[in-house]
Amino acid sequence: MSQLKTSSFLIALVSGLLLALPVSAEIDPEAVFKENDCHKCHHATKAKKGPSLAKISTRYKEKNLDEKEAIKHMTSGNKVKLEDGSEEKHKIIETKDTAVQMAVAKWILNR
Ligand code: HEC
């Protein structure tokens, strides 16, 4: 009897873990964006130190650029001109996980 209890406990535990896994593996691009301080320069619709996400996304559509270009930009640290005219190296996204980079790029370009 107690063995039955133990095994049903184990089954419950394992299925609980299986249910929990996909949730913790899900990527939240907006959270990544904030953790990397991207939001300090990029607002959804208003220009801050950098162009708004809406502006970036519109320009990418006009120029037929895709996520690959956005990922190149957020991983290479190119020099950029801020709204106030000063120049600095663009922030490099901390993660090296290309799936996360892709999710952030998609999220930006769908603004
Ligand atoms: C210190 C301010 C600043 C921070 C922080 C910042 N950016 Fe930018 N970003 C800029 C500026 C300025 C530009 C415009 C560059 C240009 O047009 O020359 C830009 C442009 C971009 C572009 C458009 C690139 C292109 O090809 O025109 C993307 C995408 C982008 N940023 C993503 C991000 C992401 C993702 C982060 C966080 C990891 C981030 N930015 C953090 C200032 C910033």
Image (spheres, rainbow, N blue to C red):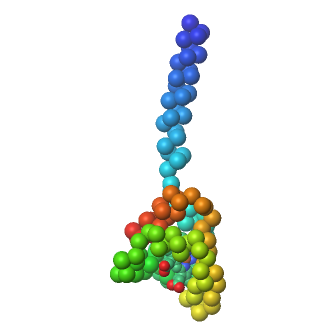
12 vs 111: above or below: above
- What residue appears at the point 56 percent right and 27 percent down from the top-left corner? 13
**Does residue 71 appear in this view?**
yes
| Corner quadrant of residue 6 | top right
Q: Quadrant of residue 78?
A: bottom right
Is residue 76 or residue 5 the one in the foreground?
76
Image quadrant assignment for residue 35: bottom right
Which residue is depicted at the point 50% across and 29% down? 15
Q: Residue 4: image x %, image y %?
A: 54, 11
For residue 70, above or below residue 89: above
Q: Classify 72 as above or below 4.
A: below
Residue found 57% across the figure and 88% down from its top: 81
Q: Splitting the image into four quadrants, where does ligand 1 fall?
A: bottom right
Q: Single out the residue that lies furthest toward the bottom.
A: 85
Q: Which percent across, then down, holds residue 60?
A: 40, 78
Which residue is at a point 59% across and 93% down the rendered structure image?
Answer: 85
